[in-house]
Structures are given as structure tokens and as C-alpha cells.
Amino acid sequence: MKTLNPQLKTAIFIAPFLLIAGFIAMDYFKAEDGPPDNTLYQLHVVNERCDFSNNSCLFSNDDLQLSVILEERLDNGSNTIRVTSEQTLKGVAIALTDIDDESSPVSMVSTDDRQHWHISIQVPPTIFPYLRMVVSTDKGLYYAEAPVTM
């Protein structure tokens, strides 16, 4: 029987350690990536629609819950919309339009805590008002659509 040369003995001895080290390194570098922050999630309206006459416009998706309130008309004819969340948000954009209108949402302004957002907008005179919203968080982007009762 032939004996193994020293390089082959060393390779056979080191191979299992390299395999284990490779699995550990793969898990380490995979964990650093984290979830992608461009993932898109849908926010579901809690009731069938947003009822602004009763201040009942709630959206939710697992760990994110939002409250949307339409406040009284200001002197210049516009209304203030407020969005409140228990989580810190990166950004909020909202549109209050007709159901068939494809207008783009308007970015809202935040307070210092980034949990309360507001904007003054003109409410369109429409028969079928519709609310569209996009919310950005650390986890990803959320979108919502709901019919509105005024």
C-alpha cells in the first residue's frame, strides 16, 4: 500500500475546518445585508372606507398602523390632512382625488418625532373621492388606497 504524500495529508486534515469556516462566514455576511428597504407592502383599510365625517380612517399591515384625519376647512379653502403613526416614518405622500384620477401624491411635512405628518390640500369637488397614500419606513414602502366618505 502506498503512503499519502504530505500535501494530500494536510489537505485532508484542513478541508473539514475550511468547510465549517465557510458556513460561518456565509451566515455572517448574509446577516449583514438585512432586508431590502425597497420592498413594497400594502396597507389595508380597517373599515371598508375612510369615513372623514366620523374621523374613522385607519390603515394597518402587521406591525404598522396609521390614522388619517381630515380637519376642518381653512380660510383659503384648503383642508389639513394629518397622518399619525406609532412608528417613526421616513416619509409620507398622499393624494385625495377622484377614483379615476391618476394624479401623483403630495409629500407631507413631519414634526420632529417623524410620527405625525400633515399637509394642507384642496379637496376636489368629486362624486367618488378616493384616498391614495405611500409611506416609507425602514422596512420598505407601503401603499394604500381607499374610497372616502366626507
Image (cartoon, rainbow, N blue to C red):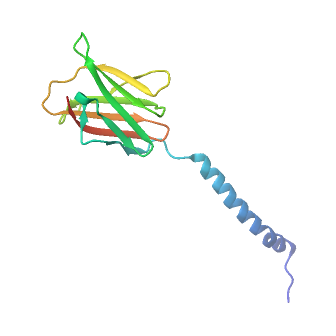
- Relative horizontal placement of residue 87, taking residue 18 as reference (left or right): left
- In front here: 62 or 42? 62
Residue 25, image x and y in percent? Answer: 68, 55
Residue 58: quadrant of the picture: top left
Residue at horizontal 40%, vertical 25%? 117
Furthest residue in direction top, as rendered: 75
- Relative horizontal placement of residue 144, taking residue 130 as reference (left or right): right
Residue 3: quadrant of the picture: bottom right
Residue at horizontal 46%, vertical 32%? 89
- Relative horizontal placement of residue 141, taking residue 1 as reference (left or right): left
- In front here: 70 or 112? 70
Q: In this view of the protein, can residue 105 be seen by the observer?
A: no
In the image, residue 113 sits, relative to residue 128, either above or below, namely above
All told, the count of numbered labels is: 0
Residue 130, image x and y in percent? Answer: 22, 34
Residue 98, image x and y in percent? Answer: 18, 32
- In front here: 74 or 51? 51
Residue 13, image x and y in percent? Answer: 81, 71
Q: Can you say which quadrant of the picture contains the N terminus? A: bottom right
Residue at horizontal 14%, vertical 28%? 126
Q: Can you say which quadrant of the picture contains the C terminus? A: top left
